Image (cartoon, rainbow, N blue to C red):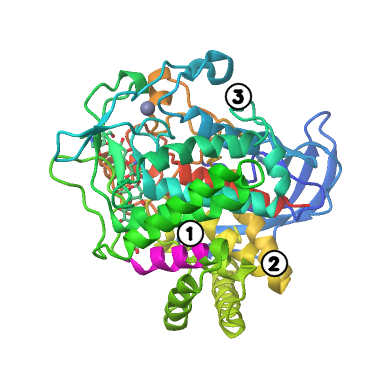
Amino acid sequence: MMNQTILVNEIGYRPEDPKRAVYRGESDAEFSVVECAGGKEVFRGKADFARECKAAGETDRVLAFDDVKAEGEYYIQLGEEKSVPFTIKENVYGDALQSLLKFFYLQRCGQELPEQYAGVYAHPACHSEKARIYGTDEFIDVTGGWHDAGDFGRYIVPAAVTIADLFLAMEQSPELKELNFDVPVDDAKLGALLSEIKYEIDWMLKMQDPKTGEVYHKVSCAGFCDFFMPEEEKDELVVSPTSYTSTLDFAASLAMAVKFYAPFDKEYADLLANASKKAFDAAMKMEVKGFHNPEGIVTGEYGDEGLEDELYWASAELYRAFGDMKYREIFDEMAYTHISHGYGWEDVFSFGNIAYLSSEYPVDERLKGIITGAIDAKADYLMTICRSNGYNVSFNEKSFIWGSNMYLIQNASHLFTAYSFTKKEEYLEAAKEHMHYIFGKNPCNTCFVTGFGTNRVMHPHHRPSAAKKEPMPGMVIGGPDSGLHDPTAEEHLQGKPAAKCYIDELLSFSTNEITLYWNSAMILLMTQLLAK
Ligand code: G3I
Ligand code: 9MR
Ligand code: ZN
């Protein structure tokens, strides 16, 4: 089914949203929108002009059917070709959002997950032993938190950007704090999401060296284990050395957390604030260098050579949270020198921009204008790419790197941010097309959120899914990577157009894995696009 010629958001559309399918066939016949039940044609239209899409190696035309608004199940037909069925209804994305949120609970480490909530992925507590501080005979308790991805490592840098996305999502849609998503809520007064994030933060706090305030980069076994359930990984846990990036990302993300927990637990919020400030001060004394795996440790590195952005983010975030001019002076100087964008684990400038623009403490108004101008300029650039292809998405041949779906999702969030102060409708519409891309309207003809759509991902690179031979639902897949960064991709994807360098195979970790921060990016985008 992965090579259909009519591509749609395989979950569906909200009644008032623009509705565009992509047609990559040759016929110039009219197309119809047909009710699944009974086969009644409810709309007829024509494909628009042909667009060459080099990134996908195809010629695409757009099928617009905005006028179809009545709630129901439909498919599109053009000649002999049919799309998969899709739904039109107001809360069409509700199940997907809840599943994307439940994923964090299902990634919990150090706790038994009962069958009542975890179904086939239920397991006894895992990784409950103390971990060796690398190169010493000292062992510390770093239990808890969420497994990072398809592996069982727990890493501070991705953890920080994950909770940052979720905090921004709750700022965008405060009702997210009240949403239930079929998980046990540890602290009812917090609500499900803040309670779930606290499980991650409580682990992060254990990763801060109480003496120096520096933050250990990760805890994992020395290498990646086989494809079994987490409690079966019995090798010694090792806490890797502290790093500049983990210490600053820790400081920034905990500074964000303070305002969310303060209304419920002042003491806990103060603890977060002190940990954040202590980490920031510690980072100011650290050597500015990226993390590299120490000898004998070969799990995920999250190494990073661009090191401005972490200080850029942390200084803005701590200024927003605490108002001390020492933070703003650092940010102002950096921003006047160089403004950039990025929300990924490697590039966190955008978190800094948003923190500065959202600050209630006084900021440099001229700088604020420069930042919003830079955001709009980047959005304008992204639109030049969107307009060039039938998917109306900001991808070109160079876009398909490891975790490309996240970068496309974050481009959409960038477009939404720019829309929020420019009100340029084209930005909002293109941002929605990126969501449609993830849910199936893409050159791979795949719904990139497990458990949803018709053309589903069945073999994600995710150890519990592999162990149970059942893809865990609600996980955003990394997507095409034209760098062919794993042996399976190298074997099967040679010569494919960049946008089609994806394979639904367990061992293709560079195209078919899942991570905390791919889910959190999607949750942020969905709350931005679905806000009332
Ligand atoms: O940013 C550059 C880009 O400028 C350049 O054009 C492109 C060329 O290929 O490379 C880009 O860098 C890539 C980077 O991802 C983009 O974020 C690197 O090549 C690529 O090696 C790097 O891959 C990372 C991967 O770990 C290997 O380090 C992924 O981002 C990251 O998501 C992934 O994270 C892993 C953890 O280590 C372990 N847990 C699973 C998790 C997901 O796969
Ligand atoms: O499963 C690991 C995945 O989480 C990482 O993203 C990936 C790259 O670091 O490595 C995967 O582990 C593979 C290892 O790198 C090489 N041997 C096979 C492992 C399982 O695919
Ligand atoms: Zn675990």
Q: Quadrant of ligand 2?
A: top left
Q: Position of residue 28 (x, y in %)?
A: 68, 56
Residue at 54%, 54% (x, y): give it.
256
Labelled disc at residue 343? 1
Q: Which residues are magenta?
A: 306-318
Task: Name the residue tied to disc 3.
Answer: 184
In this view, 35 is above or below 130 = below
Which quarter of the figure has residue 185?
top right
Which amino acid lies under the numbered mark 2 shown in the image of this protein? Ser
Relative horizontal placement of residue 310, taking residue 300 as reference (left or right):
right
Task: Name the residue tied to disc 2.
Answer: 420
Which amino acid lies under the numbered mark 3 shown in the image of this protein? Pro
Q: Nearer the viewer, residue 428 or 7?
A: 428
Question: Does label 3 or label 1 sit earlier along the sequence?
Answer: 3
Quadrant assignment for the N terminus: top right
Residue at 60%, 75% (x, y): give it.
376
Tell me if mark 1 has few (under 14), some (14-19) or many (20+) residues whose alpha carbon lies within 10 angstroms of its own. many
Question: Does label 2 or label 3 sit earlier along the sequence?
Answer: 3
Q: Nearer the viewer, mark 3 or mark 1?
A: 3
Q: Position of residue 117 (x, y in %)?
A: 57, 19
Tell me if mark 3 has few (under 14), some (14-19) or many (20+) residues whose alpha carbon lies within 10 angstroms of its own. some
| Label 1 element class | loop
Which quarter of the figure has residue 38?
top right
